[in-house]
Image (tube, grey):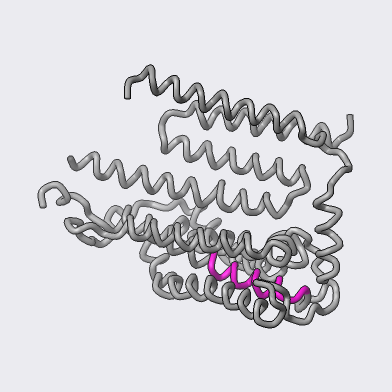
Amino acid sequence: MTETNVLLIVSLTLVAVAGTVVVATGEPSRQAVVLSVFGLLLGLLFVVLQAPDVALSQIGVGTAVVPLMVVLAVRKIRQLGSRR
Amino acid sequence: MSRGVRTLIFLAGAAGLGMLLVLAFLRCPPFGGDWHPYRDMAVPAALAHVTPNVVSSVNFDQRGLDTLGEETILLGSVLGATVLLRPGRHETRREPQDVGRVLQVTRLGGYVMLPLALTLGLDVVIHGHLTPGGGFQGGVVLATGLHLTYVAGSYPALRRLRPVSWYEYAEALGAGTFSVLGVVGLVTSAALLANFLPLGQFQQLFSSGTVLALSVATGCEVAAGVVVLLAAFLEQTIMIDSSRERAG
């Protein structure tokens, strides 16, 4: 087994585990943090698969922008909920 | 619709999708093989247009129309989100309260990373035709980098650094430039988004024709678009008081 294959198996496993954790996390604000970690691991997988362009997009969007939007939306919903 | 009927419809759909997936996977070329017909056509086409980063060549030259579509989708999504997040009739603006406390370490890290992130973003946008990256990736880095001001400082600091209307103009300018460059290609070479600029030499900053120009236009649009999008979210969360929504 070559070193690349070992890296591939490791990063694929990490992505599968992290993805399962995202799905299993109930609380949306915690889910955003786990999603961010999942995005980072997915970016790592893309680097191992020699797709640095996709990895850059993935890390920017999946690790930073989307979790931030989720966190902000959750905070707004809590504000609304606490006042009613 | 009763639960039983819904389950039946779901099962029918899932079975169809599952069957198609199995059929598709059975015909898939094996993972990691050396049969890549698309690569065999894309790499020579990229090299013919002096674009070392084949991915950028595919994005902005060979399949520029796809990117034009994606740009338009992004523009439409930002527009839609901004409309949805605008202050409602019974919502009032307020000054941000509860500024909170930022850890010294976070503050230091944020302000050290801010110039680095902005420089990296510019670098990724400008060298998209030579090295991995391009307008989309660099634009996202620029937009998220800018928000380090919020993480390390405060929301008022971010607002001072980020007059949203400028970014709205920049977003429109980027999207418009992309379309105009495409139409110029149509007029000069009879194909939308065809290259009409000199191709230059390999590894030079000004090379690969319209790939660089389209990448910079995309970078402008994506950076500004993401800033406007996050601004709408931040504004709604921090600046808008919805407490009188019900009472009104």
Question: Is A65 above or below relative to A4?
Answer: below
Instruction: Identify the image quadrant of residue B96.
Output: bottom left
- Residue B199 position within the rendered picture, expressed as x and y whole percent measured from the top left: 80, 78
**In screen coordinates, is B42 left or right of B145?**
right
- Residue B203 position within the rendered picture, expressed as x and y whole percent measured from the top left: 83, 72
Residue in view at x 51 percent, y 27 percent: B13
Which residues are drawn in magenta? Answer: B208-222
Question: Is B15 above or below relative to B63?
Answer: above
Residue B167 is a magenta residue: no
**Nearer to me, B235 or B157:** B235
Instruction: Identify the image quadrant of residue B188.
Output: bottom right
Q: Is residue A64 visible?
A: yes
Question: Is B241 above or below relative to B174?
Answer: above
- Residue A27 position within the rendered picture, expressed as x and y whole percent measured from the top left: 41, 32
| Count of marks placed on residues | 0
Residue in view at x 54 percent, y 73 percent: B174
Instruction: Identify the image quadrant of residue B116.
Output: bottom right
Residue B210 is a magenta residue: yes
**In screen coordinates, is B49 left or right of A55?**
right
Residue in view at x 42 percent, y 38 percent: A29
- Residue B147 position within the rendered picture, expressed as x and y whole percent measured from the top left: 48, 60
Q: Residue furthest left?
A: B247
Q: Is residue B153 visible?
A: no
Q: Residue furthest top?
A: B4
**Nearer to me, B202 or B93:** B202
Question: Is B40 above or below relative to B170?
Answer: above
Secondary structure mostly seen in the magenta stretch:
helix
